[in-house]
Structures are given as structure tokens and as C-alpha cells.
Amino acid sequence: MNRFSLSVSAAIARLTESALGPYQSAVVRIGFSATWLLFLLREFPHRQELYGPDGPWDWELARQLIDSNGSFTVLMWSDGQVWFEAVYALAMVAGALLLLGWRTRAMSVLFMVGVLSLQNRSVFMGDGGDNVLHLMSVYLMFLRCGRVWSLDARRARRTQEARARGERVTDRVGPVLWAASGTVLVTVTVADRFPSEWTIPALLWAAWAAQGLWWAAGRLRQSAEPRILLDVIGNVLHNGALVVIMVEACLIYATAGWYKIQGSRWQDGTAAYYPLHLDYFSPWPALADLLAASGTMVLIATYGTVIVQVAFPFTLFNRRLKNVLLALMMAEHAVIAVLLGLPFFSLAMIATDSVFLPTPFLHRVGGWAARVREALLPDRGQPLPDGVPRDEAEARGRTAGSRGQDHPDPAHVPAATTPGTPGTRA
């Protein structure tokens, strides 16, 4: 019993004292923001037909549907062309800034607003990748996904270095973002523009209030307890969201795999043959015909898809086997992107799978990126002899005893010494 109590205490301490998986969170952030941004850029010439006033699903039909289901979209606030263009541009800007990791907390909120606004405006556009992106845009709000590989991490590191030299650092952008977002929320609430469903408005107000509390706690230099408490709450929310993303990925693959088992085409090994002969899913007909001509390849693709999807949730208990199936699934999505012409669906699923990537592999990716940066910019980002960026090596040095899953942000500043500002916590 005593040993069990110690194990529970250690687990609780691990979940509250640090934000787990900072590298995995960063990859998820980069993956989904890049997927959304590339989609918006590709569909920019067709934006009017997809989500704008020229679409077959016009503004009045969308308003009737949203009134009945309570979905959230700012595109229902006006049917004007200028408003639509502004929302589309805001969605692209939010995706680009979240990709770079600039003010990730504020940008994650704007990212969610952009995704929900466009997707809920025309619910019949898109595919399974849109559904995944829809859910993940909400989960990203709870992740501390800018602790590594972001402009936020670089700014925090430079702020810490400046304060160590005795310099005074003042952040003016954070309070301006917080005040501007608060003004918008008050205006929208007073004008009764929010839908009948309260979930999204409550999330927006909670995120805004949390940033204000974080800034206020940082101003209390004589007392560190409020900042520590908020840091613990942030860690718990982050770790909970990370678990939810993992469970979501497992549910997607498990349900898809078990439903496939019930289909006769999947049972006889011919299911992969038919999509290759559909014009809608054949951007490269010659390549599709070459694959479909081999019965063995079709059989392997059909049974392999079912086996990997059904087995993946069970392989999480074995790290090596999990990594093998993870690589197979990512390769499968890459093939789907090329053969079936579904690049954004595949990118969304690969971004979801990234939450399971092993931390040592991500360290190597960081080392490769550091060497590329050093080759392009010799005077910046000096790597260490083993190829690991200096900030990552420092983070690894501060996590003795870790099993390669929890590496704190290299730019993390102790809560007791660093005042916060609205819109700056990642």
C-alpha cells in the first residue's frame, strides 16, 4: 500500500510540475497549422465558392442551419464581401503565426476561431481530415505548444538572459493583444452575436480571463504562490489535452479498422482496388493503374491497412512495436496523399500521429535542423558537438532521470521570478 501511494504521488507530481511532451506538442502545432495554412492557400482562388457569398450553400441556408444546431462561426455576423475577406485573411494570418510559434496562446485561439468559422459556414465541404482539424483546433487551445521550436521560446530565452544581466524587459505586445481581444469579446457579447450554444463563447472568455490572471500573478513579485498555482493548472490542462489527442487518434484508427473488418470487400482483400479506379480519386491514373494491376499489392494494401489500424492502440504498451506501426501508418497516409489525391486529409492524420513520435527522434530532427541553420546562417544557432541544439541540450540536462518523454522548455523561466504578460504564455 505504501508503494502504491508513492507511485500515485509521483504520478501526480509529474502531471502537475511540468508540461509533458513539449516536442510532441510543438510538432502537433506545426503540423495542424501548416495543414490549415496550405489548404487556405490552395483554395484561395476558390474561396468564394467554398465559403463565400458565391457558394451554392448560400448565407441564408447557412444561417438557418446554424440557428438550429448552434454552431459557431463569425461569418454569420455579416453577409458582406469585405467581412468574408477579412475573416479568410485572419484565418491565414493566425495559421502562419501559430506555425511560427508567435504568441502561441493568443494565436491558438484565433486559429480555432478561423477553423470553426470557415468549416461551419459550409458544412458539406471537406473530408475526414476536416473533422480531425476541427477537433484538434479546440484541443490546441489547452496545449502549451510553444515551449520549444517557436518564436515564443526564443523570446523567453532572450528575456531570461537580459534579466540575468540586470536589464529590465517590458513586453508591450501582450497587453495590447489582451486588451484588444477583450474589447472584441465585450462588443460581441453585448451585441448578442454568439450562437445559442455556449461552449465556444465560454472557452473564449475563459482563455481571455486566464491570460489576465497570469499577467496579474506575474506582477505580484512578493508572492510566488498565485503564479505557481496557475502554472500547475496550465500543466494539468496541457497534459490532459495531450492525453485526449492520443485517445482521439486511437479511437479514429480503432473504429476505422473494426468497421473495415465488417465489410466484405475488406474481408476478401479487394477494397483497395476500387478507389484506384475512381476518377475523383485518381490524380495520377497511370500510377494507380500500375498498382491496381498487381493483385498481390492490392491484397497487401487492403489487409495491411486493417491490421495496422486495429493493432495500433494495443501496441502503445510496447514502444518499439508502436514506433514500427507509427512509421507504417505515416507511410500509408503519404501514399494516400499521392495516389488518391487527399493531401490535406493525410497531413491532418500525420499531424495527429505525431503526438506518438519518440522524443529521441525529435531531438535528432532538432539536431538536423540546427545543422541546416548553421550552414545557412553561420553566425547563429551554434550546435554542440553531438549535433543537438544548445537550447535542447540545456533542457535535457535539466531533466535527469527522464525517460525521454518530458523535456521542459529550454526557455522556461521559473514562475517565482518572471512576471507574465497577457498573450505571452505558451
Image (cartoon, rainbow, N blue to C red):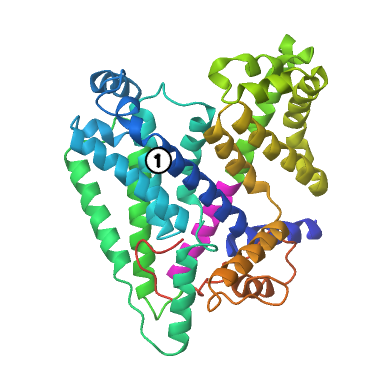
Q: Which SS class for mark 1?
A: helix
Residue 70 in sight here: no
| Residue at the far bottom in the pictured view | 166
User: In this rendering, is residue 245 above or below 254?
Assistant: below
Q: What stretch is highlighted in magenta?
A: 225-242
310 or 379: nearer the viewer: 379
User: In this rendering, is residue 333 above or below 273?
Assistant: below
User: In this rendering, is residue 279 above or below 392?
Assistant: above
Quarter of the image where one finds residue 209: bottom left
Q: Is residue 205 left or right of residue 304?
A: left
Q: Quadrant of the N terminus?
A: bottom right
Q: In this view, does 110 lie to the left or right of 349?
A: left
Residue where numbered disc 1 is placed = 41
Q: What secondary structure characterizes most of the magenta part? A: helix
Instruction: Please give the count of numbered marks on the rendered protein.
Output: 1
Q: Residue at point 38% right, 57% down?
A: 210
Q: Residue at point 33% right, 61% down?
A: 212
269 or 407: nearer the viewer: 269
- x, y (%) of residue 254? 69, 29
- Residue type at the position of mark 1: Leu
User: In this rendering, is residue 179 above or below 285?
Assistant: below
Magenta includes 136?
Answer: no
- x, y (%) of residue 285? 62, 21
Q: Residue at point 35% right, 36% down?
A: 44
357 or 72: nearer the viewer: 357
- x, y (%) of residue 400? 72, 72
Quarter of the image where one finds residue 307: top right
- x, y (%) of residue 281? 57, 21
Question: How many C-alpha atoms fall within 10 Å of the one at disc 1: few (<14), some, or many (≥20)?
Answer: few
